Amino acid sequence: MRLTIASAAATFTAAILLYPLFEGGTWFWSSLGAVLAVMLAGLVSSRLSLPAWAAPALALAATWVYLTMSFAAEEAWGLVVPTKASVLELGRLLGVGWADIQRFAAPVPNTEGIVLLATGGVALIAILVDLFAARLRRAALAGLPLLALATVPATILPDPISWPAFIIAAFGFVGLLVADGRERIGHWGRAVLVRRTRMAATPAPRVPGRTSAPARPSAAADTSGLRLSGKRIGFAAIALAVLVPALLPAMEPVSFFQFGVGGSGTGGRGNSISIPNPIANLKGQLELPERRVVLTYASNDNQPRYLRIYTLDTFDGQQFGMTKPKGAVANRTDNGPLPEPPGLTGRTDVTNVTTDIEISDEIAELMFLPLPYPPREIQVDGDWRADVDTLMVFSTRDEAAGLDYQVLTSEPEPTRELLESLPFDRDAVDPRFLALPDDLPAEIRALPRRIVGEVSSPYEAAVKLQKWFTEDGGFTYNLRTQGHSNSALADFLLHSRTGYCEQFAASMAVLARLMGIPSRVAIGYTGGSTVGGRWQVGTNDSHSWPELYFDGVGWLPFEPTPSGSLGQGSARAPAYSVPAPETTGDSSTPTPGATSSAGGDEIAPGSQQNPRAVDRESQLLAGGVPATEESAPVIGKVGLGLAGLLLVLLIPAAARLVTRSRRVRALDRQATRSQDEATAVTSRTAATERVPSVTAAWAELDDVLYDYGLARHASETPRALARRLVQQYEFGADAAAALTAIASAVERVLFARDPGRTGPLRKELRTVRQAIAATVPRRRRILAVLLPPSTLRRLRGFGERLLDGFDLLETIRLRRTAAEKGS
Amino acid sequence: MAVTHDVPPQLDELVTVAHRIREAIESVIEGKGDAVRLTLTVLLSEGHLLIEDVPGVGKTMLAKALARSIDCPVRRVQFTPDLLPSDITGVSAYNQQTREFEFKPGPVFANIVVGDEINRASPKTQSALLECMEEHQVTVDGETYRLDAPFMVIATQNPIEMEGTYPLPEAQRDRFTARVAMGYPEPTAELEMLDVHGGASPLDKLEPVATTSEVRALIEAVRGVYVSQPVKKYAIDLVVATRHSPDLRLGASPRSTLQLVRAARAHAALAGRDYVIPDDLQDLAIPVLAHRLLPSVEAQGQRRLPEQVVADLIRRVPVPETRGR
């Protein structure tokens, strides 16, 4: 009975751990219902004394009825009894739920299918726990299914389980163990003889509300001691489990490559797409202290190209987000050419380029391919699919790490004339590329007009916008910028004008949309730097840029972020995006650093050497510089960690030293005083003033003995202790006399009416300590200094007092309950 | 040596006199220093002593030697199965000359009463001693007669397993402050005994070495020995531990706490200390407590004697201490 309830409680508390996997609480109440259904079935089995195998069957049936009632009531007979239709409906929902789980990453929405799956899973665990704990009487084994439940969030989510939830779950399991122990001991209690006199002297405390108490009033064994120990062990274990990891240096794996998929969870490695938070990853990568190579590539025209990974299309007022990509089977890379790039028509020249890309195998959880835009054909191993709208290429199973693939791109090379001839056309694309939140501040809405003035074509507006960001607007590139609060956009555009690629890209995309130009934000890498014939792209090449849509040409990247030494190192503006007259010549291919001198400062274009450039260079490490210092910080970190650990380990030793010096000071005080009053100090008051010094000597002796592993027994008197030590360790006459002196002084201080005269005990103490130290091996002596057990004993004493306090509180609570019941 | 601790002046005489008595007794009984010391302790703590052992190890000799070394009235009662209570307390006899009932004091009217083989008398007779031992008075025919101080009963008995014995009732055992077992003498002591006792009984040569008033003064001095609060607490802890021990069916009574502390005072005084330390209690716990305890069925099954149980308790109960900071 009790075990069934405890099993249900344990399952339910463990199920609480699942909370980070879901949005909303529907699953929670539904699972609670399922656990209750299993518990009811268990209670019925117990009451009817069904055999152990029948109980799970009954519980399964109860779960089935419950699920039918909750999820397929319309199909069921009388809302409860399962019918064929209801079974089919449940099956359908399970399929839907399964598909949903494939699709979503945690936290998943509470769709009906997912809730059904969660409820069913929790119910199964509840049945298992009940089977182990209540039927097979193996409560400890019931921890296994509970552990399985608890590991689900731990394996899926990178974040640790929150500790309050862990404590609740742990208490659930401890409760189950306690219930089991009480059942067991309760049964034993009837058989064990209990002394009559003892019972009379200390009547067993009647705990109110315990139904079994009146049933066996006098035969119950006094298990209070056991119970107390059990409680203490349980409390201590949970406290240690929570506190110790917190005290240890962080045990997270050092993952330098957490970008790509996985910002807020991967939703299981298996086969689901997760929606990452690419922006957060982007900044994280840019701030990495050292550069790591992410990928290398080579193309047949040997030009650097931006490599796009994600395309963010929706803007919520704070930041851009990604619509979940749709990968139809038809768009698998194996099945020939990818979908046509949207908007690209025959009106413009196209350069076909083949690029060979090799991804470093240290990259974790990247399930999107970095590709130049627009990809037409990809030769890659694995199940990779392209999204029709954005041409992002992703996989639900495979990871990009270690891949080597070839991609054919058709890069549009529009002339300015062609671009200028293209009109504003709002209907050419999906409306989400133009959508803006209604609550966008009016100042921002008014901004584009102010910047660009009157323009004839969207292209002219776009070029002016980019120029404003890179030259006229007075923007500064700085990685130390706050993220995306409500007013971040307005702050960046109107006030601070300081940020990095994320702000630049997003702001330009927003302004373009305000102008009526469809826009989106791409996230990926800049072209990187060339090393031995291949282009090398590192973590510091992470980048974000806006893409604007021009009907007839398609999506074109722009570059509002300052480049060069004052901005994003390897960023470059495409040729078509720079106003023609200012550039020195019309190069058909963009050159790196074409707009490099841009920035808020009043510096002539073209002059790359400005005073701040030197600083920037030293800050933004380029190329091979960090490689030489690569390992230094790691060693430093390890060293720092070790030093920290060492310091923590030395705390007991330090505490011991502090205690000893305090006691020695007490002894010294005593010594000087007694010399001052050397002649006559027999009066009672003078004697009692001495007590602290003698007790200090005694306590110190006690600790010294404990440190050396010769602890005094609790029942050993000072005199007996001295006798034992002298005999056992064959002390010399000096040490024996000193020890006897201390013992005798302590004895008199503790027990005599008048302690009499006591000389300074410091010398005696030292003699005794040396004598004791000489009896133990060197290892023990070192240990006594470095890790003194006496300090740990104090700690334990403190812990015991704490626990006693808890017990006292509980006693008070029980008494109060008893009093309330009595009244 | 930083500490010199002399015997306090008020105990000076006590130590000297006690030493004299010990020497006198030990001239009669060789190699039984502990038993002699315990006997003196009981005398000074105004208690009664039970000497238990097999026949022929010198129980009666010890009792007689103590009685002889103090210059005071000593009576000896040989307990036999047909002994009557009035044989101990005394009777009122009709005096034909005065035509009145006259109280004839029994052997308890003495400073030291030696009850030999006390467990050979019937319980009825044994319990006649009860009032005398506890109240230091005798009531016969409604008349109450005070007994002289000091008053000490030294009873000897054979172990209860021996033939022809009645077990001493719990109530009476509780009235004895301590029980001492003589034990067989060491071979050397036995050899010496053969030499000395070969001719005449050394008891005959024993002269009193202390007077009644001296002993009274000693008892008074013992009363002044200081018992600190922690030590009292420790005594109670020890006694309470016997009540909670699963090995014991019957624990020690509050009376035993009182007698334990009283005996500890005498023990301390004999050691020249005017304060009691836990060691005194530890030394006395077995002789003072063990004879009052009844082992539980389990302990009996394991042949655990109450002495062993008490020894265990002494090892387990923590001594009082004021831990330093």
Image (tube, coloured by chain):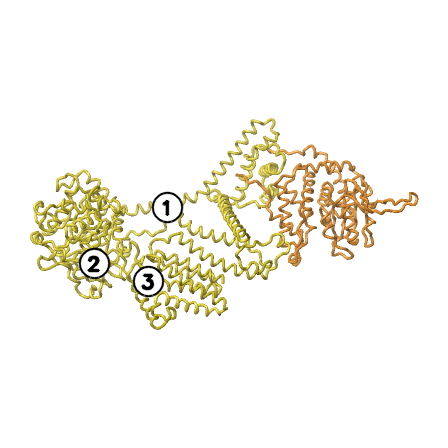
Chain colours: A yellow, B orange
Is residue A263 toward the left or the right of residue B101 in the image?
A: left
Residue type at mark 1: give it: Gly
> Hey, which residue is sitting farthest right in the picture?
B97
Foreground: disc 1 or disc 2: 2
Cα separation, mark 3 vs mark 2, equals: 28 Å
Q: Is residue A368 above or below residue A752?
A: below
Q: Is residue A627 visible?
A: no
Query: In the structure shown, which secondary structural element does the residue marked by tag 3 occupy?
Result: helix
Of all chains, the one bearing label 3 is A
Tell me which numbered mark, 1 or 3, is placed earlier along the sequence.
3
Residue type at mark 3: give it: Ile
Is residue A181 toward the left or the right of residue B36 in the image?
A: left
Residue type at mark 2: give it: Met
Q: Is residue B84 above or below residue A496?
A: below
Q: Is residue A201 visible?
A: yes
Foreground: disc 3 or disc 2: 3
The disc at residue A114 is 3
Tell me which numbered mark, 1 or 2, is placed earlier along the sequence.
2
Residue B201 location (% of width, % of height): 82, 45
Of all chains, the one bearing label 1 is A
Of all chains, the one bearing label 2 is A
> Hey, which residue is sitting farthest front in the picture?
A823
Cα separation, mark 1 vs mark 3, equals: 43 Å
Q: Return the residue nearer the eye: B229 or A371.
A: B229
Q: Are marks 1 and 3 on the same chain?
A: yes
Q: Return the residue nearer the eye: A77 or B238.
A: A77
Question: Mark 2 sits on what residue?
Answer: A392
Question: Mark 1 sits on what residue?
Answer: A641
Query: In the structure shown, which secondary structural element does the residue marked by tag 1 occupy?
Result: helix
Q: Return the residue nearer the eye: A491 or B111.
A: A491
